Amino acid sequence: MEIKPAAKYIYSDIELDREEGQVIEDLKANSQEPIPDPDQWLGEELEQNILLTTVDALINWGRRSSLWPAICFPACCAFELIAANGPRFDLARFGMEIMRASPRQADLMITAGTLTWKMAPNVRRIYNQMAEPKWVIAMGACAISGGIFASAEYAVVPGYNRIIPVDVYVPGCPPRPEALIYGIQMLQKKIARRKNIDVRKLLER
Amino acid sequence: MTISLSGKEVTAQIEEKFPDSVVESAQDNLVVKSDALLDVARFLKDTEGLDLDFLNFVTAVDFYDHFEVVYMLSSLEHNHSLMVKARCYDHENPALPSVVSLWQGADFQEREIYDLFGIKFEGHPNMKRIFLWEGFEGHPLRKDFI
């Protein structure tokens, strides 16, 4: 049987591969430190002391009650997430039954699984495509620290927080659906406390 | 249950056609000289009575002083199997002939072996990394990889 020469395969474009490799190397070099929790960015005393309770409460209620997850399930934790979505655990009770195939329509990323450096630019791109405001739940040991693959540091990202800011960490290998649901409830409590109106900008006017 | 062919009996058959192509043979496997690998593989695939037309897997082992590439072959017609091995002693630029022209299933697996062990398969239509990115240094499943 005749095998076609490499140049005829569209996926054998070595220039494309080198470009991709360069992107990965750059991302790896620039992501050696974890990105801090977004909560720490809100530490201004002014914002803590002036409250716009009614508006905030309404907006936050709307946001936390319809969290739509983007699809980003690189590995086995995805099955616990699928189980959580199924009839037994029924995530739909919390207003998040819709998995969005398009990140433009999603505001939550549940990072269910090990992330390799080769996949990292794509996850970063999905995150960047999501509309603000957006949140991230790191699900499972691999998403938190690299998990059992942390020693294989040549290929595995040691935690999603190198790539994207993470709001809630759900430990487990993999976490039970109950744990994931508890993490989502924690995130909802976090959203409920969020200040949506920039007080400093209002005062400047 | 799949019957495991005797390496010694198959070796006798191979030696008739390709003398001195088998390095050693055991109860369930045989080790082929690397430059005769493609001829022997074609013989095993096409010979009446053997018909090893299915490649279960290709994998590799690092034994410090040499690499061993393992081919698991089966016959769907006769329901028997045979393990064929080939060794390469060159640690810097190990190379073997590719068997993609015989069993297409070897395509991605040979690329994986190239990616993780650095063994080049000559005649492979698309010999490049499959898991790790282009520009990655080293081959992680080698024993001397840090």
Image: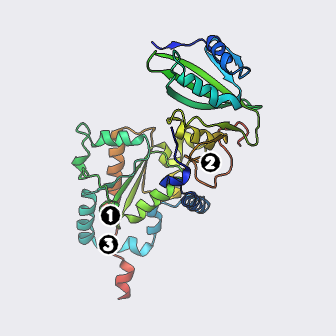
Cα–Cα gap, marks 2 and 3: 47 Å
Residue B74 position within the rendered picture, expressed as x and y whole percent measured from the top left: 50, 21
Between disc 1 and disc 2, whose residue precedes? 1
Same subunit under labels 2 and 3? yes
The residue labelled by disc 2 is A154
Q: Secondary structure at mark 3?
A: loop
Marks 1/3: CA–CA distance: 30 Å
Between disc 1 and disc 3, whose residue precedes? 3
At 52% from the left and 51% from the top, the residue drawn is A159
What is the chain letter for disc 1? A
Q: Chain of mark 2?
A: A
Marks 1 and 3: which is nearer the front?
Answer: 1
Earlier residue among tags 2 and 3: 3
Q: Quadrant of residue B99?
A: top right
Judged from this view, the residue extending furthest toward the front is B17
Q: Which residue is mark 1?
A: A104
Residue beneath the point at 34% across and 43% down: A81
Query: In this orientation, which residue lies closer to the viewer: A156 or B65?
Result: B65
Residue A86 picture quarter: top left
Q: Secondary structure at mark 2?
A: loop
Check disc 3: other Cα within 10 Å, few if <14, some if 14-19, many if 20+. few
Query: Which is nearer the eye, A51 or A171?
Result: A171
Query: Whole-percent x and y of residue A176?
Result: 37, 37
Residue B69 in view (yes/no)? no
* Numbered circles on residues, count: 3
Q: Residues within 10 Å of mark 1 (few under 14, many from 20)?
A: some
Q: Residue at x 39, y 65 (%)?
A: A129
Q: Amino acid at mark 2?
A: Tyr
Residue corresponding to mark 3: A51
Q: Chain of mark 3?
A: A
